[in-house]
Image (cartoon, grey):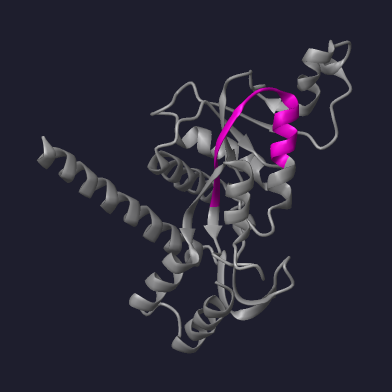
Amino acid sequence: SSYNITYKHLISSLFMEKYKENFIHYLLDTKALKIGDDFILKSKRNSPWFVNVGDFNYASATAKLGQFYASTLLDSKVKFDILYGIPEKGNALAVATAIALEDIMPDLLWFFTRKIPKEYGEATNLTQQEKIKSLVVGKAPVDGQSIAQLDDVFTAGDTKYQARETLLSLGNFKLPILAIAVDRQEVGINGKSAIQEYEELTGIKVVSIINASDIYSHLKENKIIPEEKLERMANYLRVYG
């Protein structure tokens, strides 16, 4: 019935907001979210806020991070057959997310690619078609499969374009989605965000666990960060967001 559909949608929305809220608190607890100092980004911009997903480098943090990525992928409603971790930080994300999805997708596959092809062991004496084994760690994807890509953040997008080229060189795959931890929601001098340009050029949907607006709104509403530090973040978003 329409009532049941509406009710389920409400429950889904509440769950979505909860995991985003939990992720913000987890970033704060692990000190991965830093606000108030000066951080130089790849874009050379001087930012008063920064997220370092690399701080999730111990067992319990990695496990929870995989759960957040899993929730984001499920919330997207995009279908996929296999997870691909964009080297290097995405490598661990693919494994952690696959484990987090075990109960729902027990046969979910994962892989990542080497920057230097393997030239020993099982990768020797292969036909050209089997050369994929020299580049892939994990389960090699097969033609027709739908690949969900994973990475930590999205800045200029260079590694994302390179990853797409690598995947397309390995076979005929569908690339419907890329999941990241944080969308900084920044735009370039042309008025477009790097993510928007990437989506338009590749047709790949980019989803994030949270974005800059989520972080700012939650911190302001709950008075978690001193007002002067939060105002610096607000000014930055007004200029570059």
Quadrant position of the C terminus in the picture: bottom right
Q: Position of residue 236 (x, y in %)?
A: 57, 79
- At a point 72% along the width and 68% down the height, the residue shown is 43
Is 94 placed above or below 138 here? below
What range of the chain is rendered magenta? 163-180
Residue 153 seen in render: no
Q: Is residue 220 magenta?
A: no
- At a point 74% along the width and 36% down the height, the residue shown is 165
Q: Where is residue 81 in the image (x, y as percent from the top left)?
A: 52, 25
Q: Where is residue 17 in the image (x, y as percent from the top left)?
A: 33, 56
In this picture, residue 166 sits left or right of residue 109: right
In this picture, residue 17 sits left or right of residue 73: left
Residue 190 seen in render: yes
Is residue 20 or residue 75 the one in the foreground?
75
In this picture, residue 5 sits left or right of residue 81: left
Q: Position of residue 207 (x, y in %)?
A: 50, 49
- At a point 44% along the width and 36% down the height, the residue shown is 78
Q: Is residue 179 magenta?
A: yes
In this picture, residue 204 sits left or right of residue 215: right
In terms of image quadrants, where is residue 167?
top right
Is 129 placed above or below 4 here? above
